[in-house]
Amino acid sequence: MMKRTLIMALLICSAVNSLAGSREKEPVEPFDRGVGTSSTVFIPKGTIGTGVNFSYTTYDLGNAADDTGYSMLFGILNGLKGNVYTFGLAPHVSYFIGNNLSVGARFDYDRSSVDLGNANLSISEDMGFSIADYHTLSQTYAGSLTLRYYMSIADSKRFAIFAEMRASGSYGESKSWKVDGEDRFGTFATTVKGALTFVPGISIFAQDNVAVEVAIGILGIDYKRTEQIRNQVERSVMQQSGANFRINPLSIEIGTAFYFYTGPHSKKARKNNGVK
């Protein structure tokens, strides 16, 4: 009985060892998501890119003759009379240190103004308030260093998505005031801000060296410090820092970019090489 048990144990161990050896000899295939890689050169090394983003918006509310005032938010806001405008300008330049990879710089200027003659907020029949003769004006200057990488869509020479990292710093000034009879009450504020932002987008070449680009910031780490002086007497400071991952519709950028090819990709070099 003992002899049979020993023989059975030896046979089981031999079978396990042979099975393990066969598994070790089988080649291990690497995990593949099926995405593959692309060697498409969307924008070649040595290219210089430049462009500008521009935005302008204006509103004129309730200023027609005998106008009772514009209403918004299902009548919660009513009796609106005033003017609003925003203006933004952002020139930028970049140099491609590698195929599809560029470093660059940009400057942003934004200005906005609100002149509110009247506004009524009605929460309920017994609760509400009104604002009259309120004004605000703000402007911001910002500079940024950028690192951008392009990825062609389906090996296309016209369409690509890009990912951009943007390190920026800004300085802004704003003032708001309210007129009450002959008196004026107001607040002046200065704001300093630093941010590191991830900005994805899409680039579409309408011609060989002209592209339309759309981008939107979705990820950021920032620090902001605002100092206020009220009625030229009272002073207060607010500091804010944090990280976020969200889509901000107000950060959508639409602009035109121009690319100038240098080296072997320039028109002169292509002509000398017999390339049209």
Image (tube, rainbow, N blue to C red):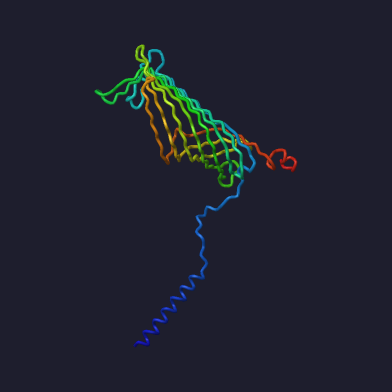
Q: Quadrant of the N terminus?
A: bottom left
Compare residues 20 and 145 and report the one nearer the observer.
145
Question: Residue at the spot x=28%, y=26% of the render?
Answer: 123
Whole-percent x, y for residue 218 in the image: 45, 39
The residue lying furthest to the top in this view is 182
Total marks in image = 0
Residue 65 image-quadrant placement: top left
Q: Quadrant of the C terminus?
A: top right
Q: Is residue 18 above or below residue 27?
A: below
Query: How far from the left and from the top, in percent, is residue 158?
Result: 59, 41
Left/right of residue 121 with respect to residue 106 in the rendered view: left
Q: Position of residue 151 (x, y in %)?
A: 56, 45
Q: Is residue 156 depicted above or below 72 in this figure?
A: below
Q: Residue furthest left?
A: 126
Residue at 56 percent across and 52 percent down: it is: 37
The vertical placement of 12 against 174, above or below, is: below
Q: Position of residue 239 (x, y in %)?
A: 39, 33
